[in-house]
Amino acid sequence: MSKSIYPCEVPTSTRLSFQILGPFQAHRDGTALDLGGLRQLAVLARLLVARGRAVPASLLVDEIWPGRPPAQPLASIQGYVSRLRRALEPDRPPRQEATVLVNAPPGYALRAGAEQVDAWRFESEVRRACDEPRQVWTSMEAALALWRGPALAELANLPWAATEAARLEELRLVAVERHADAGIRLGMGAALVPDLEAHACAHPLREEAWRLLASSLYSSGRLGDALGALRRARAFWREELGLDLSAELRALEADFLAQRPAGRPWLPEQRRAPERPAPRVLVADDQALVRAGLRVVLDAEPDVRFAGEAADGEEAVAAVRALRPDVVLLDIQMPRLDGLASARRILAGPRPPKVIMLTTFGSDENLYAALRAGVSGFILKTSPPEQLVAAVRAAAAGDALIDPAVTTRLIAAFASHPTPDSGSSHPTPDSPAAYPTSNSPTSRPFPSTDSSPSFPFTASSDSVVSSGSSASFASSADAPSEPGGPVGGIDGLSPGQLSVLRLVARGLSDRQIGQVMGLADAGALVGDLLARLGLLDRAQLVVLAYESGLVTPGGR
């Protein structure tokens, strides 16, 4: 039996390939394809960035023409899609359904295998857990060889493309540092010194850059230069940040002064993360067919357990109390008690599970209110099964937000204009009024130009309040017993905590944050930050970073 709830199979053919790590290109059987003009190319790129998720047509309009759509934007999008389909599948018979650029109501999705997109292959290599230096060196060298220039450079004026490019660039820097670390461990420190010197000078706020430079110098027998590199780092940090070196770099300096033998005695201990038990998942949806489909998907995964199901909101709340699941897949549109009210009650309980909202369409104030209340994120029901399972795993691990195609737009749209939460008084996700098209006279205005960035999460300049303010959170009318966001803003957070908050808001996982900060795993740092702010989930950290003005479009 197929695991799919909806007919959205990914083509197995590798005849098509897409390259976004440099000039945007697509090839078929090794021949470059004509992708048309810049707007048409942007449609294809935006669908690639969504990684197979459905992107609503109205969202494509907002993001391809930020603030300045043409007279008939949906017709233009349809024309672009039609021409792209002819380019991607020239042999497809007339009237036969497309298999690459597919309809995924209320929009479109691009179906491609991980091996067909250079950025996906690159990301898979960088995130692969391995500590054997020769394997890391080879893997990172292959990953970095995929880069031909800045990612999505042709579309840098579009906020979603700029933020996706910034995310990929961050991963590229992590790959550079993992490659260098493996080289030092393999005894190639002397050869790496010039490149690491340039890397540290270009990114002087990266602790890992200075650690690697000093380590390469020390392993090459250049003790004085190694200590000099750390002195330069200390001088820069004191001047720019008012901070001394981190504990790890100070320990590294002490080991150099003690002239300990070359090797890795100064590197942070690499501890294997403890294995987590398989998360137990409760499915709450009023449609029996959807519940059955989700159970098939979950039962097919050895590291996920199906805990039970519920057919309405009140039943979902009761099932959570009785079954104590780790994750709840909760439909936003539910009878008896709607998804938002159900989520609030579930999250207000002791040791609440993670909650992922299932939605069919775009966004409204109900979804944003759910984010602020502590929901982990959203995923479209049309998403492929592997993304549904990935969402469950990520939420159970307390990791990155789910489905940026929906979640990020919510934050961009409502961060500066939150409305008092009013339960089900807002339009429901299945109501046409909740999702007007961009050229509709009743459309709710979104922030202009920089309002709809893609993952990672960044805020627009006109969608922030003054730094440290929590006025937007204070305006919430949530009941006192229900989670409704932080009780205070970012005032009082240490520079290190602010750095962690920025990285979370940019969409980095715990492992990626740890790599940036030179730690084995940053899960404890994120957990401490949540506890410090009295929050339940990373989604609330992202909202706080948005509403406090800590994060800006394409900001680093």
Image: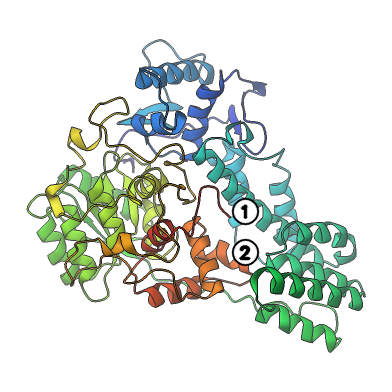
**Frontmost residue, 367 versus 30:** 367
- Compute the Cα span from label 1 to label 2: 9 Å
Residue annotated with mark 2:
516
Work out whether residue 52 can be spotted. Answer: yes
Near mark 1 (Cα within 10 A), the count class, few <14, some 14-19 or many ≥20, is: some
- Seen at 81% across and 57% down, the residue is 198
Say what amino acid the circle numbered 1 marks.
Glu
Question: Crowding near pointer 2: few (<14 within 10 Å), some, many (20+)?
Answer: many
Q: Is residue 298 left or right of residue 149?
A: left
The reply to whether residue 302 is visible in this rendering is no
Can you give x and y, in whole percent of width and height, for residue 36 in the image? 56, 18
At mark 1, the secondary structure is helix
Q: Label 1 belongs to which residue?
A: 170
Could you tell me which residue is drawn at 24 percent across and 52 percent down?
Answer: 419
In the image, what residue type sits under mark 2? Val
Labels 1 and 2 touching (C-beta < 8 A): yes
